[in-house]
Structure formats: C-alpha cells, structure tokens
Image (cartoon, helix red, strand yellow):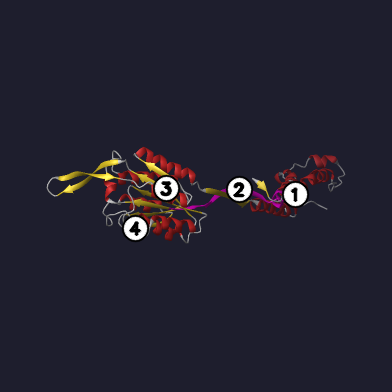
C-alpha cells in the first residue's frame, strides 16, 4: 500500500495535542450534601461506555487523516510494446528439393522443420511466406498468426506450382509485399538449391529493387555439390530414384546479399541449415520497449465509511444515552 497525498500524514502531529486536551478537559460536576450518596450509586453499563466516546472520536480522526492521504493498493499490469521486424521467408519448392541428402528427410522437409524452429524463436514480428519454383506465389502474407503460418507450411509440397527456379520473380514478389511496410527493419530470407532458370525478372535487378526499398536479403544455398538422388513415382515399380546434377549457383545469391547488405550462407546438411537460421535470428533481434502501467485501487472510501459511522455513533450517544448534564 502507498499514499498519493502523503503530506496529509503530518496531521498526526496534532494528535498528541488532542489527547492532552481530552485528558485535561474539565468535566461537569454535581454537588452532593453527603458523599455516602455517591458511594451508593452503582455505575451501569452505559456509564462504563462513556470513555468509548473519546476513543471513537480519536479513532475517527485517525481514519480521516489516512483517508486524506489517499491510500492506494497497486495492481500491477505490464504492457509490452515492441519495434517489430517484417520478415518474408522465400522458399524454393522446385523438384530438386525432393533430393534426400538432408537425412533423415529430403531438402524440403528439412527446410520446413528448420523454419518452424525459427518461427518458435520470434515473438512480435510479422512473418510471411513466399514459395517459388517455375513461378512465384505468396502462400502467406505478413502475419502475427504463427499458428496459421505453421499450418500452411506443414501442408506445403513440391508440385504446388510448375517446376523451375524463378529466383528473380520470387525476390520481386517479396519486394512488392514489403514495399508499404512501416517496420524499421524489413528482411527477406531466400532459400534455394539451384540457379535461376525461369521467370521474367533477373535476380540482380530484383535485388536492386529490394535495396531501393530498404529491404535486406539473407540468401541460403542448400544442397551438397555433385550428383544426388531425387525420388520419383514409377507407375509400375513405385518409388524409384534418378540421379541429377545438383548445382547451387553461389555467385548470384552472394551478389544478392551483397547488394542488399545481407549475408550469404551455404547449408550442406540439416545441422548447418539450423545453425544458419539461428545466426539470422541473432542478427535480426527485435528491440522490445517494455512499458509498465500500474493500476491503483483507491482505499480512502474504506476508511471514510467507518470514520463517518464512528462520528455518527459518537454524536448520537453523546446526545442520547450518554448525554452529560451541563
């Protein structure tokens, strides 16, 4: 408990003067011709209650002084406001993402799992998801609903859009989505396992557009060098594998990151990929401003009511049952 008007507590210095006055005040008296008459008078219940009048008056005064000091009971409530970051995840879902060199899953499944881990570390950022293969598509616009984003990510599979690797179109799509963002930090995280071979926009041109809009791009090249096996469904023999040449065009992602003042990373296994997203998470921390609002419960009324009751009783009994003869 605390007092919003503690200066009124100085009135307690006057209480000793009041006590002294009450103690030394002259009481009314009646003269008797014979003291034996006084001794025969037996004090009744009401006469014994007479000192309580002074006590009631004193207690009421104490309560009133405390009420004037405005006692308050704090009921804390913390409200967090933050300077969030707008983040667009750009995920390659071309056929080569089915390659099973990220054991125990394929590249796409590994990427989805690591992105889910990344989402669990973010608290107050708007995050969206753009997928691309032969063309680009916004699967989830910027949102704070991470649960909905996880659900869309869970159901994402290769074949959602036509095959290819349209990196430039994906970057241009991300730049368009972040163009009107009011966030102080706007970033995109591009993950791909190939080289640009589709779409209408050159990746470098798209990167320059992003730079002009204040968007930082982190690029991740995914996959091992050399040949790798990609599964396919044979109508007769079921799941089969064919070997394809896995080539990550590192020059273009590096240049994209350089233009936009981001970073380029290379992931050759699941552990490395997880470390990359953790590093990005550390690089793009959210600055939180915590403002504490404290709501106070006013307690003065709980003191004034008994004080008024005591004064009322004191006045009533002083003028009725405990009335003194002048």
The answer to whether residue 157 shows anywhere in this view is no
Residue at mark 1: 7
Q: Are marks 1 and 2 in contact (CB under 8 Å)?
A: no
Where are the magenta residues, as a range? 63-87
Q: Residues within 10 Å of mark 1 (few under 14, many from 20)?
A: few
The CA span between labels 4 and 3 is: 21 Å
User: Nearer the N terminus, badge 4 or badge 3?
Assistant: 4
Q: Which residue is depicted at the point 37% across and 38% down?
A: 271
Rendering coords of residue 67 (x, y %): 69, 51
Q: Is residue 252 visible?
A: yes
User: On the image, numbered disc 3 is attached to which residue?
Assistant: 254
Which marked residue is nearer to the observer: mark 4 or mark 3?
Answer: 3
Q: Secondary structure at mark 4?
A: strand
Rendering coords of residue 20 (x, y %): 82, 43
Left or right of 51 in this view: 35: right
Q: Please rate how many residues cluster around mark 2, counting C-alpha atoms within 10 Å: few if below 14, some from 14 to 19, many from 20.
A: few
Mark 4 or mark 2: whose residue is earlier in sequence:
2
| Residue 147 colored in magenta in the image | no
């Amino acid at each position: 408990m605390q007092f919003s008007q503690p200066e009124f507590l100085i009135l307690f210095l006057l209480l000793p003067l009041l006590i002294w006055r009450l103690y030394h005040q002259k009481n009314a008296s009646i003269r008797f011709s014979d003291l034996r008459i006084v001794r025969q008078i037996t004090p009744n219940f009401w006469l014994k209650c007479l000192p309580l009048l002074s006590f009631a008056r004193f207690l009421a005064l104490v309560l009133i002084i405390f009420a004037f000091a405005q006692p308050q009971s704090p009921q804390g409530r913390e409200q967090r406001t933050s300077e969030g970051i707008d983040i667009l995840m750009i995920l390659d879902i071309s056929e080569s993402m089915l390659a099973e060199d990220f054991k125990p899953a394929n590249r796409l499944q590994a990427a989805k799992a690591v992105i889910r881990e990344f989402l669990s570390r973010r608290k107050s950022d708007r995050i969206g998801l753009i997928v691309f293969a032969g063309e680009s598509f916004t699967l989830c616009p910027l949102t704070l609903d991470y649960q909905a984003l996880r659900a869309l990510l869970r159901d994402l599979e290769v074949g959602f859009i036509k095959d290819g690797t349209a990196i430039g179109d994906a970057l241009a799509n991300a730049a368009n989505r972040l163009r009107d963002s009011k966030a102080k930090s706007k970033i995109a995280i591009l993950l791909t396992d190939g080289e640009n071979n589709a779409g209408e926009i050159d990746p470098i041109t798209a990167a320059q557009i992003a730079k002009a809009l204040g968007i930082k791009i982190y690029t991740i090249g995914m996959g091992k060098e050399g040949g790798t096996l990609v599964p396919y469904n044979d109508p007769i023999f079921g799941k089969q594998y064919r070997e394809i040449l896995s080539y990550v065009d590192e020059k273009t992602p590096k240049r994209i990151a350089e233009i936009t003042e981001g970073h380029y990373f290379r992931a050759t296994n699941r552990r490395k990929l997880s470390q990359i997203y953790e590093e990005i998470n550390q690089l793009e921390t959210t600055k939180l401003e915590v403002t504490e609002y404290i709501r106070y419960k006013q307690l003065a009324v709980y003191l004034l009511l008994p004080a008024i009751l005591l004064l009322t009783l004191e006045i009533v009994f002083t003028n009725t049952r405990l009335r003194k003869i002048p």
